[in-house]
Image: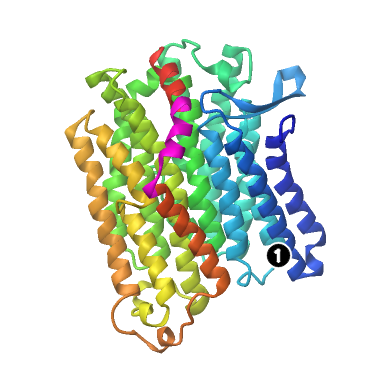
Amino acid sequence: MFEGWPLLSVLVWLPIAGGVALLAIGRQSAVLTRWLALVFAALTFLLSLPLWTGFDPHGGMQFVERVPWIPVFGIEYALGVDGIAMPLIILTTFSTLIVVLAGWDTITDKPSVYYACFLIMEGIMNGVFAAMDAILFYVFWEAMLVPMFLIIGIWGGENRIYATIKFFLYTFLGSVLMLVALVYLRFQADSFAIADMYGLGLPLSVQTLIFLAFLAAFAVKVPMWPVHTWLPDAHVEAPTGGSVILAAIMLKIGAYGFLRFSLPIAPDASLKLSGLLIALSLIAVVYIGLVALVQKDMKKLIAYSSIAHMGFVTLGFFVIFPIMANVGFSDGGALLAMQGGMVQMVAHGFVSAAMFLCVGVLYDRMHTRQIEAYGGVVNTMPMFAAFFVLFAMANSGLPGTAGFVGEFMVILSSFKASFWYSLLAATALITGAAYTLWMIKRVVFGAVANEQVAALDDLNKREFFVLLVLAIAVVGLGVYPAPLVEVIEPSLQRVLDVVTAR
């Protein structure tokens, strides 16, 4: 049906056009603004589904579009998706639709600008995942900063200015180094096409510098310890929708960069520095989990848990080197580790989005995120409590939920690298359960803590629908992850082939 369509261009530019349209006409009516935002978000999501239905897992890059952009420098407007990018684009379009629905009644200040920022950011993030040209990737990568900067800066909390500047500086400084690396690679490969930068056979010293330049950009985005400190600040100050997109999509873009750039472009340096990346990942998994235990703000607790969960992703991507050193390439352990990392990216998108939306529901009613302000919520909001407990269990890594699958795959495969890697990674399941259940116990269960909790209203139909959709996604991926695993496997195998061909 969509053969011959520039489908990826539509997914990039349709939401951006929707955002511009909202900015142009949105001030006239808040109701019209909401409905237009919903139409554009729903249409983009529906148009992203053919990527899944028409995708051949064994077909390499698909839905490819190529147009000369700046011919004098050989820069192309080149878009395409493989099994790594495609699920992330669908996750982006899904998350944006959820965000539009979640902010329906709660955003009263400048709703046209609010929704426009999210729609424009959706198009840009789709561009990041689909870009096959390094400069096009960089343009989209930098452009992401602007809408998120505005979202936190306009609709954020008391310390929003501090949070936005910290977020901007951290991410921007890392990106500058990435640009230098991309320009150098252009002269080595005689092309800005990302695929042409693979397998150049660069000396180890050069690869190391390129890897570190990429690391500066991608580690901040993930974020990895010790450059993680901007994330809790950004999450605490961001409105609920901003937190959802930050957690569900923006953190994944850093991990995506490792798969698309660091590993295949600098395989020798990736091998040399794999120990460092594994160490940083395990610190994120163990130490940040302990930091989450002492948080008093629900958002800050979930933000730290996101950093710990993303540690599994980077662990899965870099533990492949000690696995291959121990048991060889043909064993399948390395592929399992990468699959685990990728599944964790998608699963975390659902679970963290759901957790932040639950906190948003409580905040909309009581205007506080402090754990101590709540207690006994189950007595007044039983439907909400059921959803919150389910998502908390998924966040803890309960089998049968999305939060378990990727983490289990990474723990299982890391055992082939080292018993200690798997043991340290597995502690995350304990600490994750500790901080999440501690929060649930104090917020949801027990006697009604105060008059404000006693006066709470349960979920309305819109909130119920949003949380129900996410609950289906979380349980569905937890019970039956096979469709996702089958889609991503051949693409991850190709990355492994490039890495091992060094």
Q: As drawn, which residue projects farthest toward the left?
A: 419
Where the C terminus falls, by quadrant? Answer: top left
| Residue 391 visible in image | yes
Q: Nearer the viewer, residue 120 or 186?
A: 120
Segment colored magenta: 478-491
| Residue 213 visible in image | no
Dominant secondary structure of the magenta stretch? Answer: helix
Q: Percent x, y for residue 393?
A: 33, 59
Exactly how many numbered labels are in the figure?
1
Name the residue: 46% across, 61% down: 356
Q: Nearer the viewer, residue 477 or 29?
A: 477
Side of 251 where 128 appears, left or right: right
Q: Quadrant of residue 27?
A: bottom right
**Scheme of image coloration:** rainbow
Q: Nearer the viewer, residue 109 or 500?
A: 500
Q: Secondary structure at mark 1?
A: helix
Where the N terminus falls, by quadrant? Answer: top right
Q: Quadrant of residue 492?
A: top left
Three-letter code, disc 1:
Arg
Name the residue: 49% across, 63% down: 468
Name the residue: 35% across, 55% down: 395
In magenta stretch: residue 488:
yes
Q: Nearer the viewer, residue 481 or 200?
A: 481
- Say above or below: 249 vs 113: above
Mark 1 highlights which residue?
Answer: 34
Q: Percent x, y for residue 71?
A: 76, 19
Q: Percent x, y for residue 398?
A: 30, 54
Name the residue: 31% across, 37% down: 410
